[in-house]
Amino acid sequence: MKQICILGSTGSIGTQALEVISQHADRYEVYALTANNRVELLAQQARQFNPAAVVVANEDRYDELKSLLSDRPDIKVYAGRQALNDIVEAEPIDMVLTAMVGFSGLEPTIHAIRARKKICLANKETLVVAGELICQLAQENRVPILPVDSEHSAIFQCLVGEGDNEVEKILLTCSGGPFRTMTADQLANVTAADALRHPTWDMGAKITIDSATLMNKGFEVMEAKWLFGVPAEQIEVLIHPQSIVHSAVQFIDGSVKAQLGVPDMKLPIQYAFSFPERLHLNEKRLDLFKSRSLEFFEPDTSKFRCLALAYEAIQRGGNMPCILNAANEVVNEAFRRDRCSFPQMADIISETMQRTPFSANPTLETYLETDAEARRIAENLLNIKH
């Protein structure tokens, strides 16, 4: 029985991961579950899956969670940032699913790698912010990092069995989000409610907004660079509204391998858990007879500037992706709270990238300082513009 720790069990990825575990209760057990704030759901999950421990990141919710599980003394209850870092190091854990959203997932992932736990990576910001550091630590500790994002899982599946065969290009697909066909004038008036109506994927609010701006795709370009050792200029983003081709790899002989499937995260989650095995999954199958068209378009980076800013951050390197991510987290939340417009998100991110001190060779401490400073600058810019 493989023991799993889920960082972010109450989010979209975490809840789907628990469904996968339910289907394979003979193979997987939950050792620990964590959440940021949603203690009611966390307590429900704990009652169903009987973990050894639960952690709520927000220390203010500790007493509430403790009360909800007062009749379950067998389940240890912890709270706070340090508790997250400590729980992933627990001896019985075999693998850690990092499904926390945002920069907060970085430190627990580092602790899990140092404790030599297999990493099932769904927190893209970990590689966006500190890709070089994470890859170095994983190599030093001989820890596998298995991608959970549908696109990176697709690329990984295309590369299995290819050995050292040279990759010419990675084709990273993207639904285009709900605003794909809008003009720049129309984009100026869209709301968070409009953005949260994603045409094909069911995701959390933060990631859905990132999908609408195409920042999510910029982050995925960075992830792909680190996961697969392919330069950013060899990673091409394709708008694919049907979300059936999850991504593809083009090799030096011109051959293109793609992974197709229904838009459902359970398959990549399960594949990360079970690799190299493929297990039965009780979910819908792709019916190619009903998939009458597969369309691909070039993204418009003049309308969706966040994708261009992500490529700029990759090219500059150092702590610039960390600056990009911090500013994006600030404006993403601001847009959801109606504190800025859709186009202003890219404006503030760009200006934050110009104003935040640059470091070419950042350490973990640099990343933490950069994140705090970039957030402060982005917040000040928001206050000026609002």
Image (spheres, rainbow, N blue to C red):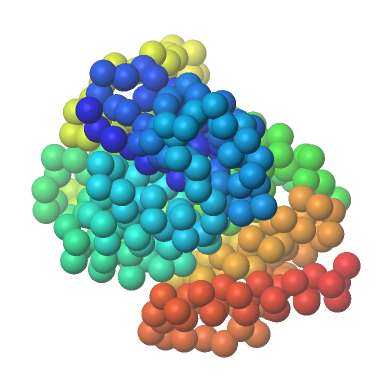
User: Residue visible at 78% across and 46% down?
Assistant: 192
**What is the x, y in percent for residue 288?**
41, 16
Q: Is the residue 138 above or below the residue 10 in the image?
A: below
Q: Nearer the viewer, residue 51 or 332?
A: 51
- Residue at the right extreme, as displayed: 386
Q: Nearer the viewer, residue 23 or 178?
A: 23
Q: In the figure, is residue 28 to the left or right of 125? A: left
Q: In the figure, is residue 159 to the left or right of 342? A: left
* Quadrant that contains the N terminus: top left
User: Residue visible at 77% across and 64% down?
Assistant: 344
Q: Nearer the viewer, residue 82 or 94?
A: 82
**What is the x, y in percent for residue 105?**
48, 56
User: Residue visible at 43% across and 25% down?
Assistant: 49
The quarter of the displayed image where residue 65 is located: top right
User: Residue visible at 28% across and 42% down?
Assistant: 93
Regarding residue 84, the answer to whether it shows in the image is yes
**What is the x, y in percent for residue 205?**
66, 43
- Residue at the left extreme, as displayed: 163
Q: Is the residue 352 above or below the residue 19 in the image?
A: below
